[in-house]
Amino acid sequence: MRIRCISKFSPRRPVHRCPPVESANGVDARRHVMTAASVYLHVPFCRQRCSYCDFFRVTDAEGTHPLAARWFDLLWQELLLWRAEGAVSPETPLRTIYMGGGTPSLTTPRVIGDFLNRVRGEFAVASDCEITLEMQPGTTTRAGVEELAAAGINRFSVGAQTFSQRWLDLSGRRHSADDTRTTITAVREVAGDTALSVDLIAAWPGQDLTALRGDVEEALSFGPAHLSVYELTFKDGTELARAEGAGEVVALSEDDRAEMFIEVACLAAAAGLAQYEVSNFARPGSESRHNTAYWTLDDCVGLGAGAHSLVWPHRYSNPHDLGGYAASVEQGRLFRVVNDAADPEIFAAENLFMALRLLRGVDLDWFAGRVGSDVRQTHAIALARLQEAGLVELNDSLLRLTSEGLLRADGIAALFV
Ligand code: SF4
């Protein structure tokens, strides 16, 4: 349950700027003929700096950042640049569009609606395209939710994080628990519970099982079709890490966190939401299609400074530089850099553990075809070690995390390489 929005997947390694035709990771890019059916929009402006956040964002407390007003125009221009090089095709129907951040719900419904109309005008959009907006409580009124739904948003991911004022204060967020209740209620009433996803954070300093249950049960009481519960982490450079270093807050023990992880899964299951990924729970059919595309290694084009893309077999990222991004896109150049693992074995391991986050597991025959090498041969010793440790199980060609492996999902990749 580590906090890690997969749409912000960020391999930490040096980057280089020239996309190779044949990848250093050993996969022949010319064999790849698909185009992306998923688009991620990164909207990096936030009203506050949350104490735990290490995402790329800029604090724009008054909403006056000069680029905020024309951000969606820049995203549109970038999308056209990806189209010009064939990574997004006007013919391949888009299946998911995801607006994340940052705080994309600070954008007006009119701007979001105009962007979606442009997309519909120039691209094929599947009739059941999943269009998600991350919503921070208190940033949108009920009328705003109505306008957003009318514009085509059909999935609202509400960042509740907690209903406890104690931890809202620690988080540095500007909304109250009542703001969260109001926003969730508006989404439910306007768009229905199938359009509602709620995000929570577990393992706050001082949180016990009773308090965790309170948060999860309140979130579930609204009947969301989807729930995400991430474990609080203390990332370098965050206010929370500083506070922990200064002894002002104490992280929960591994045992306590594991107990919480199991409790969340039980509560979600009792409400009819099955765990389908390490941190995600859904009613059957309401799994996030966008995030599932990441875990199944489908192509996704990420727009905006700080966004990441997968155009198989290459991973790209847009540097964390708003001005540089705007200038580049306006001059007709993509701002991306290549993030490929130079070592084919690391490339295979990273992609395998991305895919393994899904509880259904990974078919290693399929995976071998995807990455061009078979981990049963290239990583035989590491795989055997993980099996002996009871962290993964291999049945025929299906590799899955065990219940113990799920508790340690974020650490397993490091054991594999
Ligand atoms: S609103 Fe989200 S992106 Fe912005 S600072 Fe808070 S956690 Fe980070």
Image (spheres, rainbow, N blue to C red):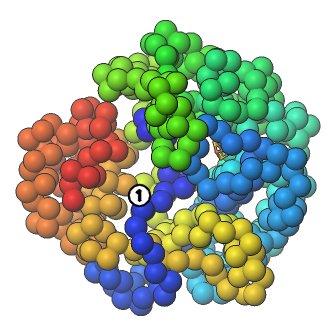
Q: Nearer the viewer, residue 174 or 368?
A: 174
Where does the image place residue 378, in percent across and percent down from the top left? 14, 67
Total number of numbered discs in the rendering: 1
Residue toward you, 286 or 411 = 411
Q: Is residue 160 above or below residue 362?
A: above
Q: Residues within 10 Å of mark 1 (few under 14, many from 20)?
A: some
Locate residue 235, reporting x and y percent: 48, 44
Q: Amino acid at mark 1?
A: Thr
Q: Quadrant of residue 319?
A: bottom right
- Give the quadrant of residue 279: top left
Q: Quadrant of the C terminus?
A: bottom left
Position of the N terminus, as image quadrant, is top left
Given residues 249 and 156, the one toward you in this image is 249
| Label 1: element kind | loop
Q: Is residue 117 visible?
A: no
Q: Is residue 247 left or right of residue 168?
A: left
Q: Residue furthest front?
A: 246
**Ligand 1 shown in quarter:** top right
Residue 384 location (% of width, % of height): 9, 50
Left or right position of 278 against 71:
left
Q: Position of residue 254 (x, y in %)?
A: 32, 26
| Vertical side of 202 occupied by 343: above or below | below
Residue that numbered label 1 is attached to: 296
Q: Is residue 199 visible?
A: yes
Q: Seen from this angle, which residue lies furthest top?
A: 210
Judge from the rendering whether residue 41 lies leftward or rightward of residue 70; answer left or right: left
